[in-house]
Image (spheres, rainbow, N blue to C red):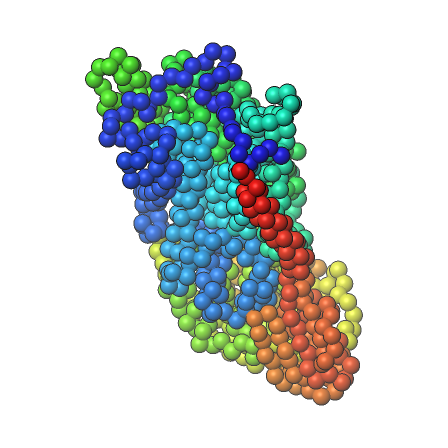
Amino acid sequence: MPPAAETVRDEVDGEEGDGGARRGPGLRSVLPSLLRSGLRSGPSPRGPLAPAAAAPLAASLLTAVLLCLATALSRTYPFGPVTRNIVDLGQQYLPFHAYWRALLLGETHGDAFLNWNSGFGSNFLGDIGTYLSSPFDLLVVLFPADRIELALYVVTVAKISAAGAAAALLLLRLRPGPWPVAAVLGTAYALSGWTLNYGATVPMWLDGLVAFPLLCLVGEWARTARRPVLGPLVVALAWIANFYTAYMATLGAAVFLAVRLLTAEESATAGQQTAGQRIARQRIAGALRAARSVLIGIGLAAPLVVVVFLGTKVADPTPVTTFAPAAWTDLLARFLPATASVASPALFIGTPALALALTLPFNRAVAPRVRAGWTAAVVLVTLSLQWEPTHLLWHAGASPNGIPYRQTFVLSGLLLIAAWLSVAQGVPRPAALLAGGALLGALAWAARGSVDIDDWTFPAFLAAAALALAAALLAREGVRRNAARTAGRFLPVLAVILFVVAQAGETVVTGKRIEEQQRSEVSWSPRTGPWHASAAREAARADAWPRYRTDPGEVPGGNDVLLVGGQGADYYSSLTADVTSSTLASLGFGYYAKGRHPVTLDNPVTDVLFSIGTRLRSEPTEPVRQDARPRAEVTATTTPVPPLVTVRPREARAPRPGDSAFVRQELLLGASVYELPRDTRRTGRTLTARCPAGSDVWFWAPEYKGSATLAGAEAGGAAVDFEGKPPSVRAPMRALGTVPASGEVRIDLLPEAGIRLPRQPVGCLVRERLDSAVRQLTATGATRVSAGGHGVTAELPPGSTGVAVLAAPRISGWRCAAGDTEAVPARAYQGLVAVPLDGRATTVSCTFRPPGLRLGGAVGAAALLALAATVFLRRRSLRARP
């Protein structure tokens, strides 16, 4: 390993080894004295801020201003009335942040291990690691509960602004140069097409956007034998904040480091080795130091990362996705402004920034090795987007659903590094500008037929290109006049202003158009408002946990219980356990997102099974619109239900593959409460059957899309909608009405497509039988139930035998004990948590510990020891220096 005091020489500026290239006069040499101190590469004793501080600060502020301006121009909240809660932002991330705020303030029943509110009990530490572990997410506690949308927007802006600051800092670390240009390029990275099209509505991915330039800095520190302790801490923070995009950022930083090692020649200080051997040794040492930082950092993050990793192993599997590369026309189009798509990579970085990046291969002021290395890196990473093996490498071996190009922010960062290396030492010469402009024009011409081109694309592109050309010409003229010692020192200032206007204006237009396109083309949720507030008040008033559950019913936005309170089935997470999804689906619950979003089921039998004593029902009082906060009448109904822990006899029989949801409910209930017609017949679009008069008709058709109506005035006759769309959407069981006195049941179907029904789609619920089952389960169930943050204790009647059943899905991590026995992994009873009883125990207790917590803790402890050893060795090395 080379001495810590080694010197480093980068051949970026072409001082030698570039075949005769000379450094041309740069912007810094021609700016007036008023700005010269701020634009020079080194610290200014006269200026209030050194470039290393001024550039990140300016990039952060400019990023925030442009992002808010784009939001305001699109009339989106918080600068307009229109919702920004599109797709998973409203269905998933907003509710999680609302619950995170409540948890941090001590307002929830669960804790960091277990979320009692969602999915009848879910692994919350895994959700924290997936969605909420970023330090920025702590900002939600500064906002009141009814301003959670504003809180999430502020978190989003803060992350994107931090990414701009980190990128600007990295650029100045790579090569000294004019800090205003570094700030603008940092903003271009933060507000790339990836951010505007994907990241802004998937806030946890933004941590990867911040991580990439920081991890590149870690690589620089490792290459130059600096900051051996801070490096692992930065890696750990990145992987804790969001391990998914941190993985991609780490791969991108590895590409960055490889190019730096191959294009920067380092000089050793001692030894008889040849220069080539010294350089090779130093490069290997730098790579090993980087690997050490990454391994220690990931190890420090292991207590969270391992929990998330094991959580994905037991999560509901999504259908396998086969990668299909985007058409090259569409890929090229995504470099242009105002384009949006989830089927092609979002590559927009701004026309001025892209033009500078395209000049690098032709810029003879930059050393040939540097030009070749960074050009090759950009080209190879671009090609890796389109090749399935490298696509899988970028996404940790699994092609993702929805957005297949999640790694694109890395390519955006590499392009902006190329742009900076081309402009840091001065405006590229005319030949380089001409060649880069020709490439840019060819790219735009080749992309003209893409389906992603918007009406605003080419007007914005041409305006930005014209302003960028004017900026370049003014800068070159300023250089010429400065060399000739004539007037014109204001020209570079005007050039910088035009560069900022071109980059900023095009970015704002792109952000505005992308928001407008997304709202018109994808699903959305309304803003939180009076409907949510009314449901939250009713849920708080009715809450009796753990005596029984309160289900908030259907509230617009999804993940209802996280927004308004209660303990229902709604749960939308990438870590939704397969046990939860399959158990609820088998009982007649519906779901979205291919099983990872179970939704509530308003059914009296499942209310009994999961001890839902109070159910909220909402009736909208006005249409739900994008530009309004919805209102609704919310009512609460309380019915007797058994306790959360009940006692059942030994399981009579295991469920069979062909069992209907009605049969599965009865097996779990331990009683026959449905009359299941044996002679259900279908004639065209009509089903006929016979049931006891006065019983309730339930229709179970999870794959059916359309409406169903129970014929006959006594039955009710209202059409009931079903939204089955396999494999992504499963329709829940729904009530159609009451069986008339004749006992004849006729169901008229109005499908939107083909009719796909299960073998037993109709069940008639006899209320008297259900009431009898409730009385039996209550009499033999727990006499008292208490619940902590991640555990339950129940007192049972003396002499209880059979199985104690906790009304919660038996997800991995539950451990239970009967009486004073040692806790062991819980058993399962028809998918729920179960504890065998021998007649002697009068109490049962169950606790939940996220799987992987011990393993992750052990790895984290080992990494902490390795970090401590690094600190010790570093201090000893410093003391040993003369």
Q: Position of residue 726 (x, y in %)?
A: 62, 50
Asked whether the viewer can see residue 203, the reply is yes
Query: 326 above or below 818?
Result: above
- Comparing 855 with 104, the one in front is 855
Disc tally is: 0
Give the quadrant of residue 589. bottom right
Q: Indicate left or right for 306 with 206 as reference.
A: right
Residue at point 51%, 29% (across, down):
7
348 to the left or right of 802: left
Residue beneath the point at 58% across and 65% down: 114
Quadrant where the N terminus is found in the figure:
top right
Q: Is residue 853 above or below residue 69?
A: below
Percent position (x, y) of residue 796?
67, 84
Residue 812's quadrant in the figure? bottom right
Residue 194 drawn at (x, y percent): 47, 38
Q: Residue 858, position in %: x, y?
A: 67, 57
| In front of the other: 215 or 827 | 215
Q: Look at 51% across and 32% down and name the residue there.
A: 411
Residue sitting farthest toward the front: 882
* 538, 284: nearer the viewer: 284
Q: From what the image shows, is residue 17 above or below residue 304? A: above
Q: Residue at x 46, y 31 (%)?
A: 174
Q: Is residue 231 visible?
A: no
Position of 125 compared to 348: left or right? right
